[in-house]
Image (tube, helix red, strand yellow):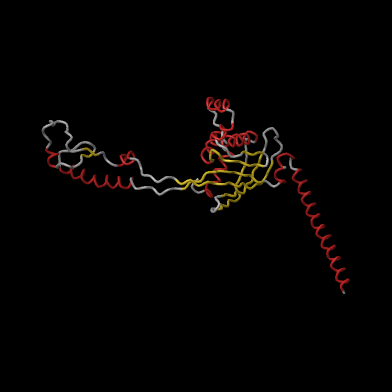
C-alpha cells in the first residue's frame, strides 16, 4: 500500500468479501511472508519457511520441499481467511473509521460485519470490532527506465556509413553525402530530398529529449506491508457468534451487575473510612 489510510478499506473488503482467487492474491500482495495474526479464537505466530524447516526433522523438511509445500505464517493466515469465507459465503462488512499512527506505523480500523453461517439460515451475528494492523514500510530502490522503454518513444539510430539499398560498398549515396558524416539515419533509412533530411534532423533533438526524460531517476517510493493483524472484540460482541443473540444480552446484564457491585463496594469503603475518621477525631478531642 502506498497510502494505507485510504487503501485499507479496499484491502479489507478483498480479504473478507471477494472470491477465493482475489482473496489469496490480496494476502500475497499485502501481507509479509512471516506476518502474524491474532484473533480471540485463533492465533498465527510469525515464522518463515526457512525458520520452520530448521526446527522440523530433516525428513519432514525435505518432504515439504519435494512436495512443493510453501508453509509459512502467511499461508496459515490465508487458510484462516479461506475458512472464514467458507463458513459465511455472503459476508456484509463495512469500515466505520480509520486512524493511522504514522510514528508507530499502526492502523486502527473500526468495523462492523454481518456474519451468517451457511448451515444456520435463521441467524446472523451483527458484530463490531477494532482491527489493529502493524505495517512495515519498504522503500523502493532508485532506478531509471530501461532502454526498451526509451526505444519505444525514441527512433532507432544507425551510423551513416551503413549502405543504402542500390549503392555499392565503395560508394555513398548523394543523400548521404549531402547530409554529411556523423548525421544519424532515422528509422534505419534515408530519403533523397532535403526536406526529409531536415525533418530527420529535427527529430534528433526530440529523441534526445525523450531519452533524457526517460533516464531521469525516479524518487524512491515507500510501500507499506502488513506485518501483524490483531482483531479486538468486546466480549458481548464475541459471544454473538455462539449464543444466537441472547448471550450478548446476558453478558450486558453481567456488566451492569458488576457496575452496581463496584458502586456499592466504593460506598461501603467510603462509609467505613468516614466512620473511622470521625471516631478518631472524637478520640483526639
Where residue 125 sits, quadrant-wise, is top right
Q: Position of residue 60 (x, y in %)?
A: 58, 26
Q: Position of residue 11 (x, y in %)?
A: 55, 43
Residue 275 drawn above or below residue 101:
below
Residue, x 26% and y 38% (percent of image)? 156
Of 90 and 236, the residue lying toward us: 236
Of 215 and 175, the residue lying toward us: 215
Q: How many labels, in total?
A: 0
Of 175 and 54, the residue lying toward us: 54
Of 258 and 129, the residue lying toward us: 258
Q: Position of residue 7 (x, y in %)?
A: 52, 46
Q: Position of residue 150 (x, y in %)?
A: 32, 41
Instruction: Report whether 195 appears left or right of 97.
Output: left
Instruction: Report whether 52 appears left or right of 186.
Output: right
Outermost residue to the bottom: 285
Residue, x 59% and y 41% (percent of image)? 36
Quadrant (top left, top right, bottom left, bottom right) of the C terminus: bottom right
Amino acid at each position: 500500500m502506498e497510502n494505507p489510510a485510504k487503501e485499507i478499506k479496499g484491502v479489507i473488503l478483498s480479504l473478507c468479501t471477494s472470491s477465493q482467487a482475489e482473496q489469496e492474491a490480496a494476502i500475497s500482495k499485502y501481507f509479509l511472508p512471516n506476518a502474524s495474526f491474532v484473533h480471540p479464537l485463533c492465533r498465527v505466530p510469525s515464522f518463515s519457511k526457512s525458520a520452520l524447516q530448521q526446527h522440523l526433522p530433516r525428513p519432514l523438511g525435505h518432504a515439504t520441499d519435494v512436495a512443493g509445500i510453501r508453509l509459512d505464517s502467511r499461508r496459515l493466515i490465508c487458510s484462516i481467511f479461506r475458512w472464514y469465507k467458507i463458513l459465511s459465503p455472503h459476508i456484509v462488512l463495512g469500515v466505520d473509521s480509520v486512524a493511522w499512527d504514522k510514528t508507530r506505523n499502526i492502523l486502527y480500523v473500526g468495523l462492523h460485519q454481518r456474519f451468517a453461517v451457511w448451515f444456520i439460515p435463521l441467524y446472523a451475528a451483527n458484530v463490531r470490532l477494532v482491527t489493529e494492523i502493524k505495517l512495515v514500510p519498504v522503500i523502493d530502490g532508485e532506478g531509471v527506465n530501461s532502454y526498451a522503454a526509451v526505444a519505444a518513444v525514441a527512433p532507432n539510430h544507425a551510423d551513416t556509413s551503413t549502405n543504402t539499398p542500390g549503392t555499392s560498398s565503395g560508394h555513398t549515396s548523394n543523400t548521404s553525402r549531402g547530409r554529411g558524416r556523423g548525421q544519424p539515419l532515422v528509422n534505419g533509412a534515408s530519403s533523397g530530398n532535403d526536406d526529409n533530411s531536415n525533418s530527420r534532423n529535427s527529430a534528433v533533438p526530440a529523441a534526445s529529449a525523450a531519452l533524457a526524460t526517460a533516464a531521469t531517476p525516479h524518487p524512491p517510493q515507500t510501500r507499506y506491508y502488513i506485518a501483524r493483524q490483531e482483531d479486538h472484540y468486546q466480549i458481548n460482541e464475541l459471544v454473538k457468534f455462539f449464543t444466537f443473540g441472547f448471550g450478548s444480552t446476558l453478558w450486558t446484564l453481567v456488566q451492569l451487575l458488576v457496575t452496581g457491585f463496584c458502586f456499592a463496594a466504593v460506598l461501603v469503603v467510603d462509609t467505613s473510612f468516614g466512620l473511622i475518621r470521625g471516631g478518631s477525631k472524637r478520640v483526639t478531642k
